[in-house]
Amino acid sequence: MILRLVPEAKAGLMNLVGWAITRLHDDEIVTYRAWNPFLGQSVLMRAPGRDGLDEGVAETLRREHALADRLEPDWAARPLRMIRHEERPALLLSDPGGAVLAAAVASPLAVDRVLRLGESLSDAIRRAHEAGLVHGDIRPANVLVTDGDRCRLTGFGRARPRLTGETGGAARDADPRDDLHALGSLLYALVTGTSPTPGRPARPGERAEGVPARLDETILRLLAPDPAHRHASAEQVVADLSACAADLGSRRGSPAVRPAGDRARLLEAVRILSRQLTPEDVGRTLVRLGIDLAGASSGTLVLLAHEPHVAAASGTGPSGAALTERLGAVVREVAGAGRALVLGPSPALVLGVPLIEEESPVGVLCLTFAPGAAPPGMDMIEAVAALAAQGATSLATARRHMDVVLREALLSEGEHLSHAGSWCMHLASGRLTWSPEHFRILGMEPDPAGSTRLDWFLERVHPDDRQRCDELFAAAVRDRRVFELDYRVKSLDGQIRHVHGSGRPLYDSAGEVHYYIGMLMDVTRRKLAEDRFQQAQAELAHVNRIAMLGELVASIAHEVSQPIGAGSTNCEAALRWLQRAEPDLVEVENAIRRAIQNGRRAGDVLNRLRALVRNSPPELVALDLNAVVHEALPVIQQELSRREVTLELGLAPDALEVAGDAIQLQQVMINLVVNAAQAMETMRDRRRVVKLTTLAGEGDHARLVVRDTGPGLDAETRERLFSAFFTTKPNGLGVGLSICRSIIESHAGTIRALPAEGGGAVFEVSLPRLRGARA
């Protein structure tokens, strides 16, 4: 499994959900261990104390993180990632195990253990100096102690470049002997249980019993006020402490405390090697552990896949073309023989050990010794061979691990590009495991634990779709069948997203179903594109209707011109009857009457047009207001469904009879409902609902109320809302509500707009009821 963590740049998104966190040591920077039972992994975390956050502390953590590439896991806790934890910056590090030295030591230690710790810690400091760093803060809180008293350094936030040139280096460079002075203080405290007095401290042997004179001298030399009187390097300290251990072992009639090739060191090296996760880390660690184990001056790992190539190299010592040629010969001979070989001594003594995988060599570890060094014994060769065997195993494991990492990365990238996340549900527990993209669809950052529960997910489903989703999923699980559905979810940032979900049962070898697996695809863009297409279709239809106005005008002209033409003809006929020598008054009267009828016909056509445009008084008939609402519902439902708005209908239980024009009243209802839906189109923080209600009002009036949950209306807008050509919509004409008011006033009624309690707007229409119709 991969440890997925959130960088500090995405502040506030990392919460270590699913990780068991244990406090190891309290200090200005607190050290924790976090363990994830699902991943089977642990990490160390360093974070500011709870009393407050000093920006200097946060900067110290950032500087330590910046040194990650220069720190190696066999002598330091390597930084992994800056995160946010409990709203504070924190640094995650690799976990070598063990405990913080400050928490592990409560009283003076036995001399032999001090020597083991001191030698390991001195060696870690030597490795830091070789990496070009002066730690600058060597103290028990920054030392981790693992099994076998192996030490790792942490707390590199105050580290500075090592002073190397004879001229003194840059002004900010540090003297490595400062670390040695701090090491002396730490050893003094481990031996005596007290801190040394600045300046001229008492000899450790005067404060604790059984301290060898050589250890006394080593510690006091480390504490010398003048750096020139201290050890010149950490390597000298390692040598002095090793000599102390040898002396102590000789006096006790036993071997030295920790000979170079002992079993404990080998087991510790194998354990370190087995924790590396990438082939590059395995190679670097194998070379350095081989150098330490064998006492070599340098090492090279050559891998044989495809063409032989150097995978890792470390250390100092002999070099040149002759040595390069010798190493090539060692690689060829060791790979051919399939066993360890020692070649030399000119130009240098080289130990070559094969890395065997499935009975074939996959690499060769070459260890080069300093001039004059004695050839390694069989015990040493066997120890290095055992380390190389673990190296071959760790390389194979790391490659498989990287294959998994690569496949997961490809899958994650594919999901990200397609906006489709995957999920798996354990039916017995209801536990859901999501892929990173599934989290992102819901507006969340991927969680390292990657899991949640079904009931939490259902809370993210849109309220109007929740019951349908729950019932469909329950039925699919009950019947062990595949399912697909489209629904909406509300992400944590409040956005409504359209998704397409699917799932299928996962059968085991016995035909039982314990898991369901599936995918969730974000189809919001596609849905919006479909809506835009439908809107374009509606706009095209509107254009077509406008184009039809030309035909309508022609039709109107035809309808009006015929009676007008007929009237003109009849008037001309009447005029001719009058101009006769003997006027025929009966014919004149008939012609005039026909002309009048034709004029009335033309007037009726114009009156109908005028009624449409100017809202002339309608022809009122007895109507049930509830029945008028029911007749308009199909149109209303269609408009609201297209805009994803929920309709709540509340009609009076008794008939509400009014005198009115059904078509015009329905026009008012549809206009008010559509306006309410349009006002909620951009709303994302709550449900979009229109409530349509009829009820008996005060006196002899019936009321029609349209209420929405939109942004509402301010006082200035309410005053001008029913004015002609006033609109709050970008593309509105400002005539809809003006026409509504004209229609209602023509019915002897009133219309008004009010703010709704809790948000939204209310439009209330009041119409007089027919006499005798009151309940």
Image (tube, grey):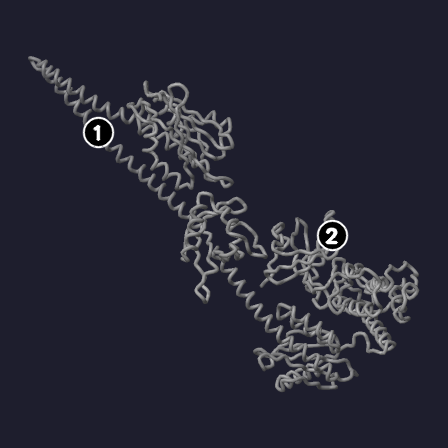
Q: Quadrant of residue 92?
A: bottom right
Residue 475: which numbered mark, if any? Answer: none
Residue 287 image point, x, y percent = 69, 74
Identity of the residue drawn at 56% across and 55% down: 446
Q: Secondary structure at mark 2?
A: helix
Q: Amino acid at mark 2?
A: Val
* Whether residue 369 is situated above or below residue 730 in the rendered picture: below
Left or right relative to 227: residue 560 = left
Q: Residue at x 44, y 52 (%)?
A: 474
**Mark 1 Cα shell of 10 Å, populated few (<14), some (14-19), many (≥20):** some
Q: Which mark is residue 559?
A: 1
The image position of residue 444, as x and y in percent, is 55, 51
Q: Nearer the viewer, residue 402 or 481?
A: 481
Residue 488 pos. (x, y %): 45, 47
Classify 10 Å Cα crowding around label 2: few (below 14), some (14-19), many (20 and above).
some
N-terminal-most mark, 1 or 2 = 2
Q: Is residue 425 visible?
A: no
Residue lying farthest left? Answer: 582
Disc 1 residue type (three-letter): Glu
Relative to residue 733, is residue 553 drawn left or right? left
Q: Quadrant of the N terminus?
A: bottom right
Q: Say which quarter of the image contains residue 581.
A: top left
Q: Can residue 114 be seen in the rendering of this structure?
A: yes
Count of labels shown?
A: 2
Q: Is residue 261 above or below residue 131?
A: below
Where 518 sits versus 150, above or below? above
**Residue 570 horizontal side relative to residue 380, left or right:** left
* Gap between marks 1 and 2 measured at Cα: 90 Å
Q: Position of residue 246 (x, y in %)?
A: 84, 76
The residue pinned by badge 2 equals: 57
Quarter of the image with the C terminus is top left
Closer to us: 123 or 580? 123
